[in-house]
Amino acid sequence: MVVLHIAGLPVEEVLLAAIAAASPLIALIGWEISSRMKRLKAALRRNPADPT
């Protein structure tokens, strides 16, 4: 972080730009995880374990 200040770049703006650039990817990963969890729960409801 100190290097960025020495180079004349404000750290906060660089971090904000990086987060803004990564946010669509983060959202897609979140949607994929939630979708897989829904499919897993649905599969578990369809095929209940044998109580015997």
Image (cartoon, rainbow, N blue to C red):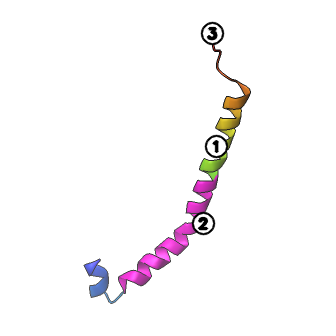
Front residue of 47 and 9: 47
Q: Which residue is identified by label 3?
A: 52
Q: Please say if the residues under marks 2 and 3 sit with CB atoms less than 8 Å apart.
A: no
What residue is at 26 percent from the left and 80 percent from the top? 2
Q: CA distance from mark 3 to mark 1?
A: 29 Å
- Helix, strand or loop under label 2: helix
Q: Quadrant of residue 38?
A: top right
Observer-side mark, 2 or 3, equals: 3
Q: Which residue is identified by label 1?
A: 36
Sequence-wise, the earlier of marks 2 and 3 is 2
Relative to 20, is 3 on the left or the right? left
Q: Residue furthest front?
A: 51
> Please, what is the three-letter code of the amino acid marked with disc 2?
Pro
Front residue of 45 and 30: 45
> Please, what is the three-letter code of the amino acid marked with disc 1?
Arg
Q: Which mark is residue 24?
A: 2
Label 2 Cα neighbours within 10 Å, binned few <14 / some 14-19 / many ≥20: few
State the quadrant of the N terminus: bottom left
SS assignment for the magenta stretch, majority: helix
Q: Which residues are magenta?
A: 10-31
Instruction: Confirm whether the magenta stretch covers residue 18.
Output: yes
Residue 22 is situated, as x and y percent measured from the top left of the image, at 53, 67
Relative to 15, is 21 on the left or the right? right
